[in-house]
């Protein structure tokens, strides 16, 4: 189907099903129950899962295929976000121009950065991209963001937002005052109550999900194309390719620009869901995050980055919200002295300490599952069907990165 | 139950608004007409404070104050400022008979992160009001989000003119004072103590609050004859200011104005003192340092260095009025130390919100806005206060404080030099430093 092999079609259908039924899958616990704390099926987080999924899928085209580790991809995310908000400010709240422009601008920006950075490989490439991203961040934060100057492109720390005094030349009279797709606001949701379960279907989420599927499909096509094969060759031995008389730079630059456009799309969608673009999303921590997502899920695999993105965003949004009060409710059954002891320990791993939990899990995954969560899944599958183990092993070697 | 500040017209207007809210087309819990209407026996408030980053100390203190306020609203504890508050609508049985519960989030002092955490509190936990925060950048960003989403935002510590100036929103309210008020209160004292022939050098945190404070202080001091030598912007995340202090020595300035707050101010002041600025003589005068926005937490962080340094503050625990005393007592009993100004403003905001719901008879944001606009109250520690309808800013007395030379305890670090009366810090809603924004109309979100 769609020019895909059977295996890839299945994968695409699985992702489509996951995206379609996410509101059900992510809300497994009834409202008001103690476990409702772990429900993730609310619009903001579902949107983030999908948007960062797109970001990581794009990053994987560069990192997973060519092995070039970019530490500056957040710059493209940020540029995409700013472009989209500028479209809202100038043209109006319809999301189409914003999304298109964010992809184009991020693409152009990545041509420039990629052209310079790709003159080096390995650690030097990583440092160059990091330097460019930090430069962009500082420009956005301070130089281009001072409201008192005449050239205020980013509005600095406060973040670029839409004011009622903005031109919005294409806005029609009755159009909503929020990002919308031909009148359907991104914020609008339909809530379905089934017994004590509450499921939320959000328009913005489904727009992101559709774009994720398109991005995912394009990524599969790239992975399976001769172009993708060339990128893999770059990863396994770029020198040998150069010796055979082949110029690899156009291929790596193309991969860099494609992944930059994916990042731009993700940034544009972030602004579409919440029309404020802050400079922090260009900071090096944001660049590092997408590297973590990709490695955690499984670099070089198709589904891995999406899983990694979901994993990290889940921790960031759910574990960081468990505060002392919640812990007291959980461990209330213990005797007082013991309760306080247990809470003192657990406290460091939740709430503001969620980074600690994530760090531990990341270490475990990298140590025991170098292929990421995908490898974990494959191992479990192999355990479950010993008879077909030979088959699975073959597949595992296929999708594990060559290095 | 002795006194209701409810006029016949007010009741009619509120009723009409609530009616209009009900008549709106809705698809979310269609019976209520506003977002996150509490359906059970409890109501959820969202407290969004910095738990990490340069303002984490303030955030932790804000959270303590919120917990205390919720306790008092639910009728637990000694009631604190509920007993001294001039409006007696609250009865200690929650808000409108519903028990108050709360969820917390971490703003990280980043606009993006703060909006994400506020969004998740609104969407996941059903918070009907968002409060807290210790940065104006965050306050402006979250206020915009609350306006779009249709919940009330009760700003925490935010001192930028923009929060109730060009970025003001109908659903947002600020109890804290602002940079303009600081400048108006501070300038006469500076003139009295340091004379009217001074050269000032500004170091400014590079975001909305720093900019507006720099603008306000420069304008007020220039009006009394000071000269502004230079204005230098420093990144919010900076921790070492030595490279910014060195040029001050050679600039010919004799006053350094630190437009920094929290951890920024602690570090920059410490650097300035280490460079020997305070012992210097320039232009035949003693070199002076001014910190326009001061707090006890900062004074504690900077230790010895704050002695004799002037600044302004919204509230200080050593105030002797009945309300402040009651608040300090119940906060001190629960946590063992006196509250900061950040804690005070957050506590006051929670009470003001609860009281507005009670007087409006609904949680509908439009009803709450109606009840808070033009509301005059007393007994929350700042004397008679007005919530101005035109920009949702509170007007009250401003304290000019000084680092104490001989502190008697680790909390007794600031002394009040002057209480500047409200009349002296008032300004027109369309003052140039505040112009450009529009309040818009209240948004009930559904």
Image (spheres, helix red, strand yellow):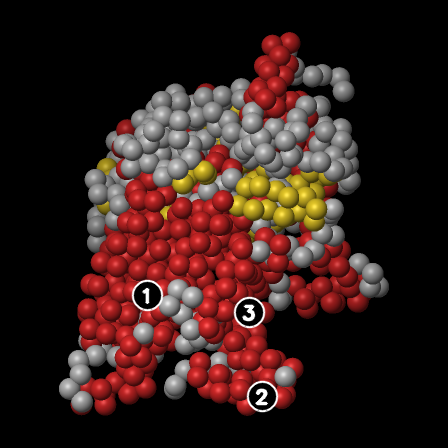
**Separation (CA) of disc 2 from disc 1:** 34 Å
Report the mark closest to the observer, 2 or 3: 2
Which numbered disc, 3 or 1, marks the residue that appears first in the sequence?
1
> Do the residues marked 3 and 1 share a common chain?
yes
Identity of the residue drawn at 61% across and 28% down: B33
Q: Is residue A4 above or below residue A248?
A: above
Quarter occupied by residue A334? bottom right
Q: Position of residue A271 (x, y in %)?
A: 39, 48
Q: Position of residue B106 (x, y in %)?
A: 54, 53
Identity of the residue drawn at 45% across and 49% down: A207
Circle 3 residues within 10 Å: few <14, some 14–19, many ≥20: some
Q: Is residue A263 visible?
A: yes
To which residue does mark 2 refer? A389
Circle 2 residues within 10 Å: few <14, some 14–19, many ≥20: some
Q: Is residue B202 visible?
A: no
- Quarter holding the N terminus of chain B is top right
Identify the subunit bearing mark 1.
A
Quarter occupied by residue A92? top left
Element class at badge 1: helix
To which residue does mark 3 refer? A358
Q: Is residue B53 left or right of residue A84?
A: right
To which residue does mark 1 refer? A259
Report the mark closest to the observer, 3 or 1: 1
Which numbered disc, 2 or 1, marks the residue that appears first in the sequence?
1
């Amino acid at each position: 189907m769609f020019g895909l092999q059977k295996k890839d079609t299945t994968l695409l259908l699985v992702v489509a099903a996951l995206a379609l039924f996410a509101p059900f899958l992510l809300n497994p616990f009834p409202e008001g129950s103690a476990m409702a704390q772990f429900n993730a099926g609310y619009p903001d987080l579902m949107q983030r899962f999908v948007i960062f999924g797109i970001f990581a899928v794009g990053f994987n085209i560069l990192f997973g295929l060519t092995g070039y580790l970019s530490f500056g991809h957040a710059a493209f995310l940020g540029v995409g976000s700013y472009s989209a908000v500028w479209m809202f400010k100038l043209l109006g709240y319809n999301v189409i121009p914003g999304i298109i422009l964010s992809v184009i601008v991020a693409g152009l920006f990545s041509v420039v950065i990629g052209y310079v950075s790709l003159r080096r490989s390995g650690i030097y490439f990583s440092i160059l991209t990091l330097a460019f991203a930090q430069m962009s961040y500082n420009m956005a934060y301070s130089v281009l963001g001072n409201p008192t100057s005449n050239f205020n492109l980013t509005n600095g720390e406060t973040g670029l937002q839409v004011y009622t005094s903005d031109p919005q030349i294409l806005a029609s009279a009755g159009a909503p005052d929020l990002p919308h797709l031909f009148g359907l606001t991104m914020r609008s949701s339909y809530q379905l109550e089934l017994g004590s379960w509450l499921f939320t279907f959000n328009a913005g989420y489904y727009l992101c999900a559709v774009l994720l599927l398109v991005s995912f499909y394009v990524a599969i096509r790239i992975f399976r194309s001769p172009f993708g094969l060339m990128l893999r060759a770059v990863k396994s031995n770029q020198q040998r390719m150069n010796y055979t008389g082949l110029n690899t730079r156009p291929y790596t630059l193309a991969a860099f620009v494609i992944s930059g456009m994916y990042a731009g799309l993700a940034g544009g969608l972030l602004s579409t869901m919440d029309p404020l673009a802050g400079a922090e999303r260009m900071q090096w921590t944001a660049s590092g995050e997408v590297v973590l997502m990709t490695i955690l899920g499984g670099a070089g695999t198709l589904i891995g980055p999406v899983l990694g993105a979901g994993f990290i965003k889940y921790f960031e949004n759910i574990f960081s919200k468990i505060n002392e009060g919640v812990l007291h409710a959980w461990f209330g059954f213990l005797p007082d002295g013991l309760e306080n002891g247990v809470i003192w320990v657990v406290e460091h791993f939740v709430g503001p300490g969620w980074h600690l939990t994530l760090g531990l899990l990341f270490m475990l995954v990298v140590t025991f599952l170098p292929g990421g969560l995908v490898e974990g899944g494959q191992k479990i599958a192999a355990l479950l069907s010993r008879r077909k183990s030979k088959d699975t092993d073959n597949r595992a070697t296929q999708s594990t990165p060559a290095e | 139950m002795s006194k209701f500040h409810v006029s016949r017209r007010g009741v009619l207007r509120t009723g009409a608004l609530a009616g209009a809210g009900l008549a709106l087309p809705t698809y979310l819990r269609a019976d209520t007409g506003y977002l996150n209407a509490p359906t059970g026996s409890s109501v959820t408030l969202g407290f969004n404070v910095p738990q990490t980053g340069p303002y984490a100390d303030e955030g932790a203190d804000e959270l303590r104050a919120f917990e205390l306020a919720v306790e008092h609203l639910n009728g637990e504890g000694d009631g604190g400022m509920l007993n001294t508050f001039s409006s007696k609508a609250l009865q200690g049985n929650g808000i409108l008979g519903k028990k108050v519960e709360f969820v917390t989030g971490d703003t990280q002092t980043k606009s993006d992160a703060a909006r994400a955490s506020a969004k998740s509190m609104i969407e996941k936990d059903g918070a009907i009001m968002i409060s807290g925060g210790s940065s104006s950048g965050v306050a402006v960003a979250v206020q915009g989000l609350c306006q779009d989403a249709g919940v009330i935002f009760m700003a925490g510590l935010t001192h930028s003119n923009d929060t109730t100036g060009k970025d003001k929103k109908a659903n947002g309210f600020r109890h804290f004072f602002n940079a303009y008020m600081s400048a108006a209160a501070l300038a006469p004292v500076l003139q009295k103590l340091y004379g009217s022939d001074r050269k000032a050098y500004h170091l400014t945190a590079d975001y909305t609050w720093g900019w507006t404070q720099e603008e306000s202080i420069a304008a007020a001091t220039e009006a009394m004859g000071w000269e502004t030598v230079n204005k230098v912007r420093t990144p919010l995340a900076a921790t070492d200011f030595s490279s910014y202090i060195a040029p001050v020595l050679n600039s010919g300035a004799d006053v350094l104005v630190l437009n920094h707050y929290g951890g920024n101010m602690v570090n920059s002041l410490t650097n300035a003192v280490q460079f020997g600025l305070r012992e210097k003589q320039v232009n035949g005068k003693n070199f002076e340092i001014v910190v326009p926005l001061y707090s006890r937490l900062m004074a504690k962080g900077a230790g010895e260095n704050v002695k004799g340094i002037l600044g302004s503050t919204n509230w200080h625990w050593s105030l002797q009025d009945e309300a402040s005393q009651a608040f300090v007592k119940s906060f001190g009993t629960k946590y063992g130390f006196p509250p900061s100004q950040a804690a005070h403003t957050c506590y006051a905001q929670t009470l003001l919100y609860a009281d507005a719901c009670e007087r409006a008879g609904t949680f509908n944001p439009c009803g709450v806005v109606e009840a808070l606009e033009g509301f005059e109250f007393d007994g929350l520690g700042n004397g008679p206060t007005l919530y101005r309808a035109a920009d949702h800013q509170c007007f009250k007395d401003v304290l000019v404080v000084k680092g104490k030379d001989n502190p008697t305890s680790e909390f007794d670090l600031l002394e009040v030099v002057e209480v500047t009366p409200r009349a002296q810090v008032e300004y027109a809603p369309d003052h140039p430093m505040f112009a450009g924004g529009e309040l818009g109309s209240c948004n009930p979100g559904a």
